[in-house]
Image (cartoon, grey):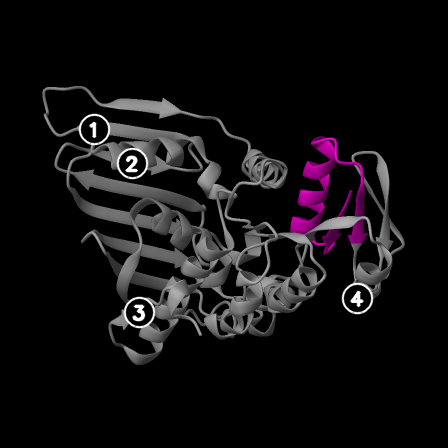
Amino acid sequence: MTIAVVGTGSIGRRHLANLLSLNRSDVIVVSEHHKITSLTVNGMQIPIFHDFDALLKTEKKIDTVFICNPTSMHADYLAKSLTAGKNVYLEKPVAINLAQVTELRDLVLSHSATIAVGHQFRFHPHLIALKDKIESGALGQIQSVQALQGEHIADYHPEEDYRQSYAARSELGGGVLLTQIHQMDYLNWLFGPFEDVIATNQESSSLGLDVEENVSYLMRSQRGVVVYGHVDFLRRPKHLSLTIAGTEGAVEWRYYEGSMRWTPADPREKSDISYIPLERNQLFHNAVGDFLESINKQRSPRSTFIDGVNSLAIVDAIKTSVATGNNTRVKKFDELS
């Protein structure tokens, strides 16, 4: 069967290259905005189509669609793909907001297709090990969680004007919260579900953006864990870390340094630090591999559509809290109607 990759931006090309490396040569590309006729990836020339609707009608061999276009288009392309009976790998975030998801809820629930969302941090070996520590009780009672992430928006794609990128444009689904929704997803995976959030932002006049660029928030989970989170488009050098303190010890994960340090609560015991020099693309590669395997084995992928919606619900609640100044309840997928 054939896979259609929608979108020829950086993420579409990345997924295309990973599919080819997984020996999936039965791939075509859809680009409705860039009128190129073919694309060469990993030494292979891939045909490009420009009409997604027509392609779904004429190419009956397509059984899977990778949706890698701007966030503002995700909901529409997901609806078209599901209506045509296709499995879907949907890049994060699932939509611009929960209102778009609500319109899709019944359609998603009425189809048996496999849907995965591109939250690849769930495949990081350190976070997998950390989840095991939390669930086994090795950290004891969780007392403090701090998640920090910052990278200057101009450094995302240095070859282009950052003000024209999807991350900088509200109409395409930009803003630091949707762009860095990975943070909300792995926090939800480790500690969720979350009940409520209170948030604030501080905007910089130097970037000239119409989207949020610097947000801090506090969330409380159903099990009583309070998480402090921060994301921004301003930081140099870039930074991504997660620090957890429990009654039995503490963990500090630093993504770009490739390290995770375990510090026992007993000061007489030595700390332990592990390094995993992980190439960033490996996370994407593993996520795609898991999705394809989930189709073949008829199981759920590690990051499901509902997972993606629950992460988006956190972003929606943060935005509402920033706008109102109030503590805001985080909605759940089952509550959408």
- Judge left or right: residue 337 versus residue 247: right
Q: Earlier in the sequence, mark 3 or mark 4?
A: 4
Q: Nearer the viewer, mark 2 or mark 4?
A: 4
**Residue 294 lies in what quarter of the image?**
top right
Q: Which residue is mark 1?
A: 263
The local secondary structure at tag 1 comes to strand
Q: Which quadrant of the view contains residue 331?
A: bottom left
The x, y position of residue 240, in whole percent, is: 40, 44
Q: Which residues are magenta?
A: 1-29
| Side of 246 relative to 79 (left or right) | left
User: In this view of the protein, can residue 157 be seen by the observer?
Assistant: no
| Residue marked by disc 2 | 252
Q: CA distance from mark 1 to mark 4?
A: 55 Å
Name the residue at 54% across, 65% down.
95
Residue 14 occupies quadrant? top right
Residue tagged by mark 3? 200
Whole-angstrom CA distance, mark 1 to mark 3, is 31 Å
At label 3, the amino acid type is: Thr
Where is mark 4, residue-wise? 53
Which mark is nearer the camera, 1 or 4? 4
